[in-house]
Image (tube, grey):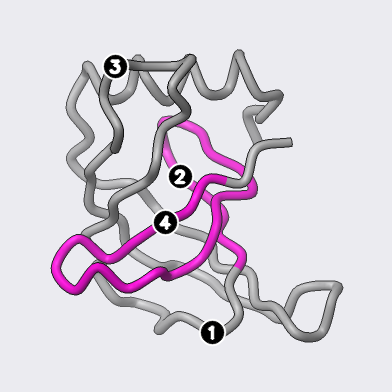
């Protein structure tokens, strides 16, 4: 399983970690709940073996949230918005390399 760190592009704040991703959306796990219905500008760390780029930058709308099965954490479903075709290819490579699956 792959848990890449996810940051706010503008503030640099660590928002959480990716626990699932597809070209259409992502699931984040975090220590604090994220605001639902908010447009986020995200920066995800990429593993060295996946790309020469260090980060994947994109916009995502938080569409749903709930407490994780571990009560100290929160899960947030994100809808990816305006993702470049080259970034979709990177996301598909993440899915293939790290076992994420289409939902």
Mark sitting earlier along the chain (1/3)? 1
Residue mark closest to the camera, 2 vs 1: 1
Residue 9 found in image quarter = bottom left
Q: Secondary structure at mark 4?
A: strand
Q: Which residue is mark 4?
A: 6
Compared across the picture, whether 102 is left or right of 36 comes to right
Horizontal and vertical percent position of residue 89 = 35, 15
| Residue on which disc 1 sits | 33
Q: Which mark is residue 52?
A: 3
Q: Quadrant of the C terminus?
A: top right
Residue displayed at 48% across by 15% down: 49
Which callout, 2 or 1, points at the residue further toward the start of the chain?
A: 2
Which residues lie in the magenta part?
Answer: 4-29
Cα distance in 3D space between marks 1 and 3: 32 Å
Instruction: Look at the picture and state if 87 lies above or below 4.
Output: above
Viewport quadrant of the N terminus:
top right
> For residue 58, which quarter of the picture?
top left
Label 2 residue SS: strand
Q: Is residue 8 above or below residue 90?
A: below
Q: Contact (CB < 8 A) between labels 3 and 2?
A: no
In 3D space, how far apart are the residues under numbered discs 4 and 2 (Cα atoms)? Answer: 14 Å
């Amino acid at each position: 399983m792959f848990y890449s760190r996810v940051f706010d592009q503008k503030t640099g704040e660590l928002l959480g970690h990716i626990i699932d991703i597809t070209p259409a959306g992502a699931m984040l796990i975090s220590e604090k709940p994220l605001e639902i219905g908010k447009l986020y500008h995200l920066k995800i760390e990429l593993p060295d073996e996946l790309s020469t780029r260090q980060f994947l930058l994109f916009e995502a709308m938080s569409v749903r949230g709930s407490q994780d099965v571990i009560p100290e954490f929160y899960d947030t479903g994100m809808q990816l918005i305006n993702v470049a075709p080259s970034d979709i290819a990177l996301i598909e490579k993440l899915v293939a390399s790290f076992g994420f699956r289409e939902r």
